[in-house]
Amino acid sequence: YKVCLFSYGQTGSGKTHTMLGDQSQGSSDQSQRGIIPRAIAKVVEASKANAKKGWTYDMSASYVEIYNEQVRDLLRAGSGHSDKHSIVH
């Protein structure tokens, strides 16, 4: 399956909190996890259960931010979230 989660709204409306959850250092309250960590946990849990039945998987993920018509790859190692990609029309 291909999935896209899109969060749109006014600055300060809670998009990041909804998607990521409580990002406080040392926070271990599982009930405060956001959509992304909950979804990843479920996918990994299901893949491990099905791997015992002989299923195999090829998974990939991307995590980008689009802000002021600039796209930032948030998973790119070492990018410091400063590399920007243009949207070409």
Image (tube, rainbow, N blue to C red):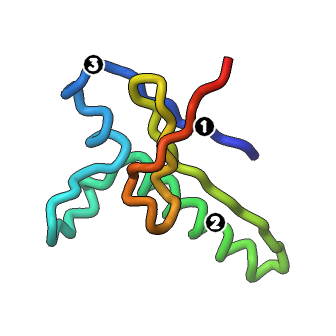
Q: Amino acid at mark 3?
A: Gln
Q: Which residue is mark 1?
A: 4
How many other residues sit within 10 Å of disc 2, few (<14), some (14-19) or many (≥20)? few
Q: Position of residue 37 (x, y in %)?
A: 42, 57
Q: What is the distance, in whole Å, between disc 2 and disc 3 at their CAs?
A: 35 Å
Q: Nearer the viewer, residue 76 or 85?
A: 85
Residue drawn at the location 53% of the way across and 36% of the way down = 5
How many other residues sit within 10 Å of disc 3, few (<14), some (14-19) or many (≥20)? few
Q: Position of residue 27 (x, y in %)?
A: 17, 66
Closer to the chain start, of discs 2 and 3, is 3
Q: Amino acid at mark 1?
A: Cys
Q: Does 32 sit left or right of 85 as displayed?
A: left
Q: Which mark is residue 41?
A: none
Closer to the chain start, of discs 1 and 3, is 1
Residue drawn at the location 74% of the way across and 72% of the way down = 50
Q: Does 74 sit left or right of 29 as displayed?
A: right
Q: What is the distance, in whole Å, between disc 1 and disc 2 at their CAs?
A: 19 Å
How many other residues sit within 10 Å of disc 1, few (<14), some (14-19) or many (≥20)? few
Q: Secondary structure at mark 2?
A: helix
Q: Which residue is mark 3?
A: 10
Q: Position of residue 60 (x, y in %)?
A: 68, 60
Residue drawn at the location 22% of the way across and 57% of the way down = 23
Q: Is residue 50 above or below residue 8?
A: below
Q: Secondary structure at mark 3?
A: loop
